[in-house]
Image (cartoon, coloured by chain):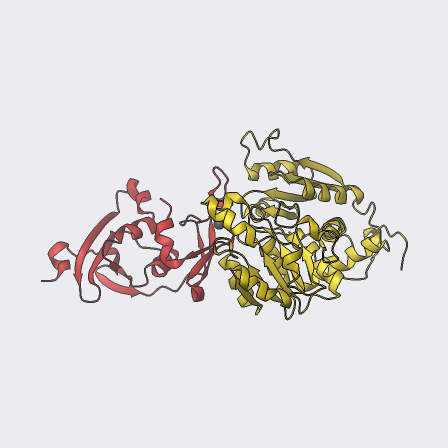
Amino acid sequence: MSGESLLVRKIDWGTVLDHIPAWKADQVIKLLNLESLKQNPDVSVIVLHNVPSKKLGRKDIVKLYHYMVSEDEAEILALVLPQITINYIRDWKVEKHSPGLPEKIVGKIRCPETTCITNVEREPATPRYIVMKEHGVIACEYCDTLLEIERIPDFLVG
Amino acid sequence: MPSSISGGRGGESPLGLKNTLAGRDIISCRDLSREDAELVFSLAEEVNSGTIHLEDTLAGKKVALIFVEPSTRTFQSFYVAARSLGAEVLSIHDPAVSSIAKGETLYDTVKMIEGYGADCIVLRHPARGSARFAAEAAAVPVINAGSGSQEHPTQALLDVFTIKSRLGQVDGVKIGMLGDLRYSRTIPSLCYLLAKYNGVKIFFMAPPLLQVRREVELYLAEKGVTYRKAVEADEIKEMMPELDVLYVTRIQKERFPDPTEYERVRGSYVVDAKLLAYGRRDLGVMHPLPRVDELSPEVDKLPNAWYFEQARNGLPIRKALLHLVLGGAG
Ligand SMILES: [Zn+2]
């Protein structure tokens, strides 16, 4: 019996984020700012931790019932968690989505440079990054500071 | 073509060059091309030699100086430059008594000063990224007069101008940068501007904690600039004979978590006659000033000391830049 059928039934409409490294589902929740959905009665978030996986040994799964991740969101997810698979579900039909890489990221990530203008209290400066995939970093467009892509989860806003 | 030209207005063109800087923000030396820099240099050179006077070319214009950090020299330099070009100066200098101390954001300060009719904003601010942010907030051009430890493009312009004046050209220059390369705002700007020239070679001489930031290295690599790093005193001495120019920056005690480490490092990064003896006789020594004790006064009398001339070049460079940014003819 697979972990999935053991734990939760299928959804008819929404997004399934699969192959998230085990215990990293919170990064997905932060990247998608899912807490902002708390007033939304239509959306449910189902989080599965430590599910057996052929590919990863153990993995997390996040099911977003009645929520379709946007292309922008999908791109950031794929950047930070390259193993992730994104499946859109419409009327039980599964459609696998392979997002491209983002060229820019706006908001979502705090600049690691403490003296950056985007970290100055009350200053209305939204952080903005250029993705330099070939160097494995993103660069703050305001202060030029580089952040390694694998360190992005440590700097997620929220 | 000597004599006083009230340059710019009425289509007069002191140099006969196209003004590529009119209305532009001067935020980062990454954004400046070699042609942009050479335009500023050509005009500054004429101003220096007295063949072109830019008096009153900015009459009727308002230049705002927002200095949210104590900086007497750069402030004075911009103030005198703007006034001598005939501009009115709106200044917010002392953050202790200004609205900034009362907690006003940079965004609001920029909006307010624009409301007073500023045609251009010169900004010194302790935050990295402040100049770009201000430029996005402002409709008028913003000139970065120092954005935290990030950049100081007008300093780099006067630095490269000094190198060009002394060596006749910038292409092929071999320059050592010594001291605090990590927190010095002049070092990235200087590197970004030098990267626009051919065959430049840079030697970064600093302790590991104060070595040049990675984004500067990436930029140099992308532009095909050769650079090397030296950490130990012996390596520095080994590099000395190769250099045309030695650019010295201040090492500040507060950058070191451990004061004994600072004491250890300090001695290895002092420029005196003894260190210069390892270099070529015509090696030029530069320093953005003010200095503390990283540059011995005994160097002042040597022909190697370029730094007083370098400091004097601040005024003509800033005059030329203000003239060009505010739309004067090239
Ligand atoms: Zn930043």
Name the quadrant containing residue B200.
bottom right
Query: Which corner quadrant holds the N terminus of chain A?
Result: bottom left
Furthest-left residue in view? A1
Task: Name the residue at 30% across, 49% down.
Answer: A29
Figure quadrant of residue B271: bottom right
- Visible residue check, residue A148: yes
- For the colour red, the matching chain is A
Q: Quadrant of residue B51?
A: bottom right
Percent across and percent down for residue A106 are 45, 52
Q: Against B111, is B278 above or below?
A: below
Q: In the image, residue A134 lies at what x, y percent?
A: 44, 67
Q: Which chain is yellow?
A: B
Looking at the picture, tell me which residue is in the foreground, B43 or B271.
B271
Image-based side of B225 in relation to A111, left or right: right
Q: Position of residue B230 (x, y in %)?
A: 53, 62
Residue B25 at what x, y percent from top left? Answer: 64, 51
Residue most toward the front? Answer: B274
| Nearer the observer, B271 or A61 | B271
Can residue B116 be seen? no
- Nearer to the camera, A115 or A2: A115
Count all numbered tags in the image, as a single digit: 0
Q: Quadrant of the C terminus of chain A?
A: top left
Left/right placement of residue A5 relative to residue B19 reads left
**Point 82% across, 45% down: residue:** B56
